[in-house]
Image: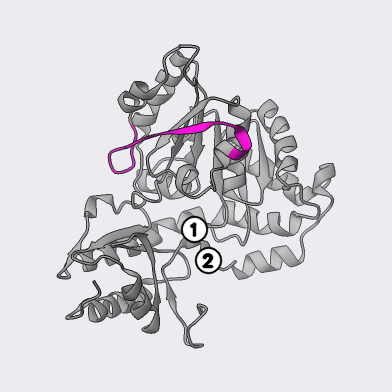
Amino acid sequence: MTVEGTSSTRVIDLRSDTVTHPTEAMRHAMATAEVGDDVYGEDPTVNRLEARAAEIFGRESAIFVPTGSMGNQIAIRLHTQPGQEVICEARAHILDWEMAMVSAFSGCQLRPVAGDRGVLTWDRIKAMIAPQIYYRPMTGLIALENSHNMAGGTVTPLEVYEEIWSGARDAGLPTHLDGARVFNAATALGIPVSELTAGFSSVMFCLSKGLCAPVGSMLVGSRRFIERARSVRKMLGGGMRQAGILAAAGLIALEEMPSRLAEDHANARFLAEFVATLPGVEIDLSTVQTNIVIFRLLGVQDVGPVLAQLKKRGVAAGSAASDQIRFVTHRDVNRADCESASHIVAEVLSGQSFS
């Protein structure tokens, strides 16, 4: 894989699992996909993908959307009323990376709550539910994330969710899961996604991250919820026509790719344990539970120059804060790549000042 601004030499791209390329099987399926007009509900490949996603998650229905952000925002719009609050974790994707659409599109505000390494418990959530006072914005939704991107891919266990589901039901509140990487979370916990997500009112998950599809995410829920979601998807410009070309890759992503995610997790752990041995690096190995590695460079104010040096040496990485570097492992980076990347990181960090 090459990255803009580098030579044609292959770059070890650890910026995100969104950079994954579709497999050869996906490319063939896309080229031969049976298609129709999905706005009319006539694309048979999209219909098969939606039916299969609903089946895997134990839901009545599902809808194919272009992006995970769109799936999240559709759900938030349907679960809330303007003027309400949405409780979320303090570094949630819907807060940091979805362009303030909770307010712009649904007319709600976010009520962020700091979790323990990204994990929110019912006690923390309950304390932030608004009292029933007419001059305060009421809580309309609890929106959670698993695995948690900016916490380093940490996983919320099932027992934590069971308490949240019970408390939310008693409080009369719907719950939505941003499950962009929920298959990673389920892999780490060793349980099916249907079990891990059973109590949520709705779930969004991505096909285009570790599952390697080129485009697309799914939103699952009740039949009535998904019927309403089709109208909101159209409002957001998400009504696609011969989308079976994309759905064909999504079917392969859904059926074949979850079983290999443990390999990505093992590679992330390898990188994390190597980085932990380097001087001037601070990393909490307990947070490396899936395919994301975040570490801090001590005494460095801006990791930009470090990232530039890594890129010149053939390793593309991202940042999680001004002093933090982020690696994400995926199918297009194997163990040999991770070994090469670790040596390059050591060489770039050794004996140099980037502050």
Q: Is residue 167 above or below residue 222?
A: above
* Marks 1/2: CA–CA distance: 7 Å
Q: Quadrant of residue 214?
A: bottom right
Q: Is residue 106 above or below residue 309?
A: above
Three-letter amino acid code at disc 1? Answer: Gly
- Residue contact at pointers 1 and 2, CB within 8 angstroms: yes
The residue sitting at 35% across, 78% down in the picture is: 310
Under tag 1, what secondary structure? loop
Based on the picture, tell me whether residue 116 belongs to the magenta stretch. Answer: yes
The residue sitting at 60% across, 26% down in the picture is: 82
Q: Position of residue 228 (x, y in %)?
A: 71, 30
Q: Position of residue 297 (x, y in %)?
A: 23, 65
The residue sitting at 69% across, 26% down in the picture is: 224
Compare marks 1 and 2 and give the one earlier in the sequence: 2
- Considering every residue shown, the one lying at the far top of the view is 133
Res 56 seen here = no
The quarter of the rendered structure image containing the C terminus is: bottom left
Residue nearest the viewer, comparing 106 with 248: 106
Residue nearest the viewer, comparing 219 with 270: 219
Based on the picture, tell me whether residue 219 belongs to the magenta stretch. Answer: no
Res 73 seen here = yes
Residue that label 2 marks: 20
The span picked out in magenta is 104-120
Residue that label 1 marks: 210
Three-letter amino acid code at disc 2? Answer: Thr
Residue nearest the viewer, comparing 21 with 80: 80
Q: Position of residue 222 (x, y in %)?
A: 64, 28
- In the drawing, does residue 78 fall left or right of residue 349? right
The residue sitting at 66% across, 47% down in the picture is: 65
Q: Is residue 158 above or below residue 165?
A: below
